[in-house]
Image (cartoon, grey):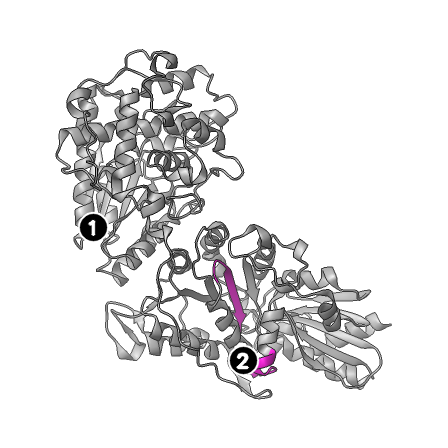
Amino acid sequence: MNAATLPSAQYSALAPDFCEGIQYYAPSWPGFAEHAATPAIAEGSQAIASANSLSAAYQTLLAADALRYLTLQICAAKASGHPGGFASSAEAYAALVMLGHTNIVTEVGHHAPGFYSAMFLDRSLEEMGIRTVQNLRDRFREKHGLLGHLSGAIPGLLAPAGPLGQGQHFAMAGALLHPGTLFPVTIGDGGMGEPYVLNSMMHFNTAYPTVTNFLPVLIWNGYSQEHHSMCTTWSNAEMTAYWKGHGFENVFLVDAKNFDDKDQAGAYVDSSQFAFDRRLAFAAAVLAAADSAAKSALGGRRTVMILKQLKGAGVHKLGAKAHNLYPADTLDAEHIVSALQRRALSPEAWQIVRDNFSRAGGGPAAKTAVTEQVLDIVPLPKLPIQAFQPGEKQVPATAFGALVAFVGQHDPRFVVSNADGNEASAMANINVALKIRHPVEDSLYHQGPAGQVYEPLNEDACAGLTAALALFGSRSIWLSYESFAINGWPIVQTVAQAMAELRRKTPSSICMFTAGALEQGRNGWTHQRPEIENYFAAQMRNGNVYPLFPCDANQIQVAYDWALGTHNKSIVLIASKSPLPVYTTLEQAREGIARGAVTLYESAVGGKTVVFAVTGDMVLLPVFEAKDQLEAAGHKVRIVSAANPRRLYRPTDVAWDTVSEPDNAFMDDDHFNALFDGDVLIGVSGGPSGPLEPIMLRTRAGKRDVMAWKRGETTASPGEIMAFNGLTGEAMAARAMALLG
């Protein structure tokens, strides 16, 4: 297998068409005629017949080296990309495919070139017009091609992977929605240093003890991106205990060190350096472990598989130095050439690997992966929206909670998550109706083993499961305080971007964050962090992100009703948990969500006109106080609720036409000017000013200002915290009078 490679020209008549672009070939391995005369996955089959077959192990090793070769060659074609991490996982990935388990996700975005290589080998990338290795090289890390980190928009790939610590959520969501299907998720030991990876799985294991059909596959290679991983000094026993301590009953660990015949130094070794018989024995052990792990997970046992092998095994460098390619790492560089030649296969071997991969799991993943079809979900009856009367006081969060409870009662797969507790957010009605999912039955706390309310004390775990469920095609909602939402927001942003690219419809990812900044005076600044609203505001330009600011209990109901009817969007509702005045009728409420804004009040008479453009609900209290003072001074006042500010942008401000399920509903100039024209315009927000940007961009008012959140402080009341931030009726009226001159 280490024989010198021959010029490609001598193989041109033998190589399959898809091999165009492969630079190096080699003679067939010893035993090829005996173990690779026919594909181990027979025609019409979805997996190998036996994991104990030496021929199956032989062909698993062929697949591992094919993956290594393609991974390195496509990265070197651009002198860019990350081959090292996936290289150490190659036997595990190949074994899972040979066993027919092709619904594979990953926590490691840096494994992208390996996953793309697998999708090429199983023919999934033909959906993108990638039919040859040359096409694969050309389209890697290019626009409209194969982006540098994984995307669920790539045919056959189930989910995105970018920031570390996210992949396990997709595996758990898939397992929850598709009993009987295995969802392996590869996890790097560098990323495992993030505490929430196993933390989130432990809570899931406790909440859903019978959902065991996801399989973490730890690629324990001793290194992170630029240094040793933080668990590099652990013994095998310590690593096993770590996983068992997080609720995993069966741990299958294969250590390449046990097969080393080259006396490699250190605990982590490169299996590609072994003699051929030891390489084959290692591949056989990985295949057997993968088979046992898969059967264990599908058989009701919480299971993990661990492959311990040096990072960069089989490619151009080892350790963290194998992680990334740089401009000097081209296809002409000697160390790249020699690495590719070491991994070169014969044309016959490439055809065997292609046959096995294209049959595994029932065909190309682009045809068979669970995310390649729209998931059937239960149709919902009309929501029981309550028509509160303008002038009465109602709690927006509670009105909203009643609808969430209704959805859960009619959709058994619906999951609600909340780390800080629904009761604390005036949404106890959700818990009463749907029950907190907990192994201990207790009616006092509305909890039980079959509950639909998922409450890990970890915002990442809350956001991760619900966002993943939405991406995989099911309804869900994440509830939190906006003060804490930043801890879970990165995966929602990841899913939002993935939804923008999807080739299928999926329910929108929906969140509701109680706007605690103005309500949490006694708790102080730890609960007064509304700045995340600027994050949402920045994302509005993406094209599929909608922060909603319902002004009252009527509008939050119609906002949720609207959100439930959308697809491939990321929608965040911001609302209070305090009794607040109802300003709108249901008709007005719907107008505000559909058009973007609605007038809540306008003076009948007066002199010059002051317009208040407002995002939020509680902050309307001082706005109406300012109205009284300005009217007393002889001025007209118009108060406009900007409930859906994304609709207030100009179409050219937003990348709406670049996303799946595009929405080009933007308020036209005539309607915009009718709402916001005045002698003075003051934008008001109980949070930061970002959501007001579309109004400030378009307004014709020459005199304008913004009054918004500044910082938190411990106070005795909402009024005091608003005063601390200059958000009082007196201050607003004074500013308007100053602008009026």
**309 drawn magenta:** no
Q: Which residue is mark 2?
A: 554
Instruction: Using the rendered image of the protein, determine whether residue 521 is visible from the camera's viewpoint.
Output: yes
Location of residue 112 with respect to 215 vertically, above or below: above
Q: Residue at x 32, y 24 (%)?
A: 314
Of 426 and 550, nearer the camera is: 550
Residue 58 location in percent, x, y?
A: 20, 27
Q: Residue at x 55, y 86 (%)?
A: 393
Location of residue 132 with respect to 394 vertically, above or below: above
Give the class, few, some or many, for how many residues have Cα within 10 Å of label 1's Cα (few <14, many ≥20): many
Residue 215 location in percent, x, y?
A: 26, 48
Q: Secondary structure at mark 2?
A: helix
Q: Which residue is mark 1?
A: 297
- The amino acid beneath tag 1 is Ala
Give the class, few, some or many, for how many residues have Cα within 10 Å of label 2's Cα (few <14, many ≥20): many
Residue extending farthest right: 741
Q: Secondary structure at mark 1?
A: helix
- The amino acid beneath tag 2 is Asn
Instruction: Using the rendered image of the protein, determine whether residue 318 is visible from the camera's viewpoint.
Output: no
Query: Which quadrant of the view contains residue 315?
Result: top left
- Quarter of the image that includes the C terminus: bottom right
The answer to whether 442 appears left or right of 508 in the picture is: left
- Quarter of the image that includes the N terminus: top left
Residue 677 location in percent, x, y?
A: 77, 71
Query: Which quadrant of the view contains residue 4?
Result: top left
Residue extending farthest front: 13
Dots 2, 1 in contact, CB < 8 A: no
Location of residue 194 with respect to 536 vertically, above or below: above
Between marks 2 and 1, how big is the CA–CA gap? 46 Å
| Residue extent of the magenta highlight | 567-588
The answer to whether 641 appears left or right of 637 in the picture is: left
Q: Residue at x 16, y 43 (%)?
A: 292
